Amino acid sequence: MSVGADRFLKDLHQLRTFGATGTGIVRRAFSDMDIAARLWLAAEMQEAGLTPQFDPVGNLFGLHPAEKSLLIGSHSDTQPEGGWLDGALGVLMGLAIARASVQAGGPPVSVVSFQDEEGRFGGLTGSRVWAGDISLSEVDDLCDFDGISFADARSKMKELAGDFVNPAQFTGYIEPHIEQGPVLDTSGEKVGVVTEIVGTRELLVTLKGQQNHAGTTPMPMRRDAFQALAEFSHELNGRFQNVVASQTVWTIGHVEVHPNAASIVPGQVRFSAQWRDGDAGRLACMEDIVRETLADVCATHGIGARLSESQQILPVKMDTGLREKLEIAAEQSVPGSWRKMPSGALHDASYVARLMPTAMMFVPSIGGISHSFEEDTAEDDLVIGLNVLARAAFG
Ligand code: HGY
Ligand code: MN
Ligand code: MN
Ligand code: MN
């Protein structure tokens, strides 16, 4: 069955226009642009012969009329500074294949765009609720960095919200995605078939020192919250060397210095500490090291520390049966130009795997760049990925 590549590419460029700034895509969960994009997707789903359905947390499904269907999708929200393909690619590949399936009467395919994959409220929120990892009342209490609650944010879509979709109607889930790393771009291979998705742990930390005059406060008398963070980060890099492996990564990505003024000794710093690995035991051991290191640095500098509960996402293996379908389709489409590989990025598949057989496939990212306005993939590679997925979906 042939899938309309031209319409797929046209839809990708259309979706890109929602939240397009001068140099990239900004479509934060529940923002006006995010909602506008979801409404456009819902109309596209309708036109493709699917029944669009929003659930209470903003997940958007395009449901095939058949009793059972394969679910293909990803997310359409972006990071605060995102690219045009992260998430969008998987949703529109699913839509293109579902459209072809309806037109040709092929094997039924439904589509999904999950909400808040990119973590305005912690990450993978829409699929996390759908998988039952967090309840609606618990998720409603989550707040973004500006103190806006999930409940307030999702209230913008209350007229659209229907019931939660029953996962039992799906035979499995495949999430196509850009690799977001350098492996395929470097090797020249066209497809990655994902074997497993790493796990992660993330803490939010507030360090409280003493705000003071930057000119009159002698160095030995300071309780400088930023200096404490700098020493924590340095010390942590050293202590981690005893437990990490080559694929382990850790990031202090969000930092707020208060009052963030050149002539004031920082009295408070709020920051995120996140680490990822394929081994759940190593993630737990790293959390102990994070907490010990923080306690030691704070004791040395007379700094107070407040830590959030750590958000934990377990490492997950992809479904063998679905993965092998992707491997066969890749070998038929691009013989020898594909590989099996782990995912260092998190995906909604991390939670959907708790509900049904789940698999993922990657297309290359130019320069391995993502979560950046420079994120891009050659159109030929996008179409190759679409054809491999269609082969896997239609058997
Ligand atoms: O951070 C992640 O891995 C995901 O892309 N949000
Ligand atoms: Mn993504
Ligand atoms: Mn992302
Ligand atoms: Mn040192």
Image (cartoon, rainbow, N blue to C red):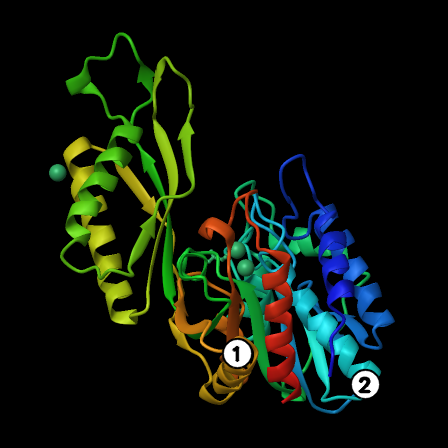
| Number of numbered markers | 2
| Viewer-nearest residue: 211 or 119 | 119
Q: Relative to residue 68, is residue 264 depicted above or below?
A: above
Residue at 34% across, 24% down: 266
Q: In which quarter of the image is the N terminus?
A: bottom right
Q: Please state which amino acid type lies under the numbered disc 2.
A: Ala
Residue 384 falls left or right of residue 39: left
Residue 182 lies, in percent from the top left, at 41, 55
Residue 89 falls in which quadrant of the image? bottom right
Looking at the rendered structure, the secondary structure element under dot 1 is: helix
| Viewer-nearest residue: 159 or 13 | 13
Where residue 32 is drawn, which disc sits there? none
Labels 2 and 1: the sequence-earlier one: 2
Residue at 38% across, 41% down: 271
Where residue 104 is drawn, which disc sits there? 2
Residue at 59% across, 55% down: 378
Q: Relative to residue 82, is residue 87 depicted above or below?
A: below
Residue 347 lies, in percent from the top left, at 51, 65
Q: Relative to residue 375, is residue 334 depicted above or below?
A: below
